[in-house]
Image (tube, coloured by chain):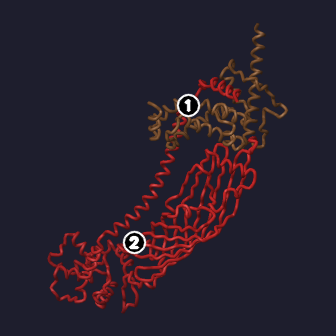
Amino acid sequence: MDDSQLIIACKKQDRNAQKVLYERYAPVMMTVCLRYSKEEETARDLLHDGFIRAFTQIDSFRGNGSFEGWLRRIFVNLALENYRKEKQKNRFMEEYGSLKKDEVVVTDEDDPLDIGDIPREEVMGMIRDLSPGYRTVFNLFIFEEMSHREIAAMLGITEAASRSQFFRAKSLLQKKITAILNNCNRRYNEQR
Amino acid sequence: MNRDNDIRRAFQEKLGGYQPPLAADGWERIEHSLTRAGAHRRVMRRRWYAGTAAALLLLLVGSIYFLRDPMTVQETIVTERDRLQPESGYAPEQPATAESAVVEKQHTYSSPATAPTRATFASRRKQDELPVRRNSASEMLTRWMQREGIGLNRQPVDSWSSLRALLLQSERASAEAVAKREEEWITVIGGDDQLLAEYDDAMPEEERLIVGLSGKGGLSSYRQSVNSPMTLRSASFSAENQHDNEISKNLLAATRASDNTSDMEHDQPFSFGLTLSKSISESLSIESGLTYSYLSSRLRNANANFRVEETQKIHYLGIPVNLNYTLFSLNRFNVYASVGGMLEKDIYGEYRKLGTGESADFNSTAQEEELTKISQRNPQLSVNAGVGLSYPLIDNLRIYGKVGGAYYFDAGNQYKTIYSDRKIVMDLNLGLRYEF
């Protein structure tokens, strides 16, 4: 059964069709949720809430674009809403967290983020360890393929602020990648 | 830029096939939530249907009574009068036919205290002034005889005393019910020598004064969802003027973002009031009074990162003027139509705006809350019409229900309400009326 047939059935609140659709897209959407959440439990809640929202608002899907894109948008919006709520709770806390101004790592512009040898789980963990602001911009830029102009418009910030956030996120990741690679090299040398 | 694209490609390739573990009970939780949400929606839908059904039932009952042939009742009245007619020429010496026997029993079966009264009453009044008594003793007797197998075409009862005994027995069994019904139909005025029974509805209509206490609820709310920014303030207030500081400008910019969704909802209005009616003819009365109304509205502008919520509560006092026309009365129901108008003015209003979003540097949250007392500039004029049904509860107290609708004219006010956006509001009106 293809997506369009499933969607028609889902619009009639067919539980079996909903289940098939869930099983088909849950892994991809869980990846999205994990990328935007530090805690796995939060990601699971996002996955749950996202599918509830998708199934209750599926009538608004007109079939103009891909269903996966529509679904992904729901999860991204939900993740951003969640981020805003969390930030509201911790509004008096220092947002910069792991990156103080004097700790800004100035990376070499020609130095690429070499993640080829790093396991997926590690890469995912590095992204999730970013502070919420950096993580949000990084995800929107890298995975949603939005330009800084679009991110700025979406988040209500300036384009320069978006670039700055992304640059800092990239710097932090570079630092972590370097640390991981150095650690691997040291272990490798110790084993030799 | 090329480096950024490389980074994109690297991360997308790395995490492209990533299959994170899913919670084992993921689908069960979703299914449970969907079922619960569906049940909640069903409950809300049922409540709505029940309300609508009640209103339709009210209309249906009115329609059924309207379509019934009123001549059926008149026939009963004529029959009653014919049956009472021989009373004026009552002569014990006349041959006792079955019909006359029935008439004579009317005098005989009644208690000694009331029998002369009725006889006097019947004999002193002209035929066309005879009271309408559908549950009179003669009819009861006829029914009782039919039930007991004593047909009207049978021979007259041999013994007056035996018939009297039977009638008294029947009378005792239903004494309370008869007394109750008699009270409803007859008002006795005067002394022992001159008793005058009046049909209670024979009181001149012009003298009636009715005090009413009513509650009214709108039968529908108003909801609007669009993908562009909205505000509860009308177009006469420009959006820019409402956002005059840095945070508010960001909020405004956010509401203009492409993914902005706006939901506005006006709740069903509800009102209650006190009215005074005066009959100006047999079927027509004019009604006026004081009515309080409460209107509430909500609006939410949201996109991925910003949210502006507005709530508005306005309290009105109004002066209604209505003409009520009784279409017909059947049994104890009165079915009436009503047309009129109302002039309302707000007495208190409250407007609250809560904006939440990111500041320009993205790393801090901005929140703005505004609470303003508001006032509408112009009074609100409306016209209304409806069909209602009233029923007597006790004595002169009647309960009534009316289904109708009102059209609200554009008052050109600053704040949007269900009056300004929906224009026509259907409503259900329930209340009590006391007739003096």
Residue B161: name its quadrant: bottom left
**Judging from the image, what secondary structure is the residue with disc 2 in?**
strand
Q: Judge whether B209 appears above or below B337 on screen.
A: below
- Can you tell which quarter of the image residue B4 is in? top right
Instruction: Please name the residue that numbered disc 1 is placed on.
Output: A26
Which residue occupies 61% across, 66% down? B413
Q: Circle 2: is it few (<14), some (14-19), or many (20+) Cα within 10 Å?
A: many
Work out which quarter of the rendered image holds the N terminus of chain B and state it.
Answer: top right
**In the image, is residue B77 above or below residue B300?**
below
Callout 2: residue from which chain? B
Q: Residue B223's quadrant in the figure? A: bottom right
Label 2 sits on residue: B335
**B288 sits left or right of B332 in the view:** right
Instruction: Label the red chain with its letter.
Output: B
Front-most of residues A179 and B387: A179
Q: Position of residue A40 (x, y in %)?
A: 65, 31
Q: Residue at x 47, y 51 (%)?
A: B45
**Badge 1 element:** helix
| Rendered colour, chain A | brown
- Residue in the foreground of this view, choosing between B368 and B436: B368
